[in-house]
Image (spheres, rainbow, N blue to C red):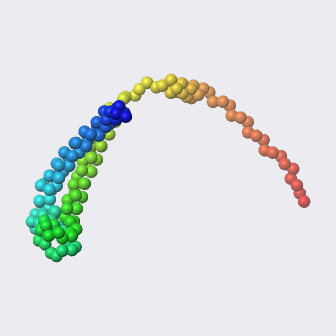
Amino acid sequence: MWREFRDFAVRGSVIDLAVGLVLGAAFTAIVNSLVNDLLMPPVGLLLGGIDVSEFFITIKGGSYPTLAAAKTAGAVTINYGLFVNAVIKFVIVAFAVFLLVKQINRLRLNLAPADTAPTKTEALLTEIRDLLKNSPAPAPAPAPEPSRRASVRK
């Protein structure tokens, strides 16, 4: 069992997955900083100097000036500002992954081997096709004569 696990763990795809996971975690930190530190402050400024992540609705527990105050008081809140931030982060990550996959697919197409020599079967089929194309067309078969039926008159 240990040997099977070791073989599984050192297989290339598992190592690739681990590397992708680590890079994804690092990329998440970059996207979080991009959204929280670069994108949302100008949006908040356009909205009158408000921090979008502070947008919330108190369901139970009174009225509070900030989300932190509401959480400290134990109020039940709907934090739609944090949700907006999460949606923006998702869109950025999804777009980045889209661009990455698009570039990888483009590289795969460019790295595809050039025209390879045809297989034996393909060569034989090509030869048969060429022979049929160059051979004279057979004479058309004579058309069948119309049947002569005796018409029955009443």
Residue 55's spot in the image, x, y percent? 17, 67
Residue at position x 88%, y 55% from top? 152
Where 44 sits versus 132, above or below?
Answer: below
| Screen quadrant of the C terminus | bottom right
Residue 53's spot in the image, x, y percent? 16, 63
Residue at position x 14%, y 56% from top? 36
* Quadrant hosting residue 72: bottom left
* Quadrant hosting residue 109: top left
Residue 48's spot in the image, x, y percent? 10, 68
Residue at position x 17%, y 52% from top? 32
Where 85 sits versus 128, above or below?
Answer: below
* Quadrant hosting residue 78: bottom left
| Screen quadrant of the N terminus | top left
- Relative horizontal placement of residue 23, taking residue 46 as reference (left or right): right
- Relative horizontal placement of residue 84, taking residue 13 as reference (left or right): left
Q: Nearer the viewer, residue 96 or 51?
A: 51
- Relative horizontal placement of residue 139, taking residue 116 as reference (left or right): right
Residue furthest to the front = 1
Q: Nearer the viewer, residue 50 or 135?
A: 50
Q: Nearer the viewer, residue 59 or 148?
A: 59
Where 19 sits versus 50, above or below?
Answer: above
Residue at position x 54%, y 24% from top? 124
Residue 57 appears in view: no
Residue 36 appears in view: yes
Residue 126's spot in the image, x, y percent? 52, 27
Residue furthest to the right = 154
- Relative horizontal placement of residue 114, taking residue 88 as reference (left or right): right
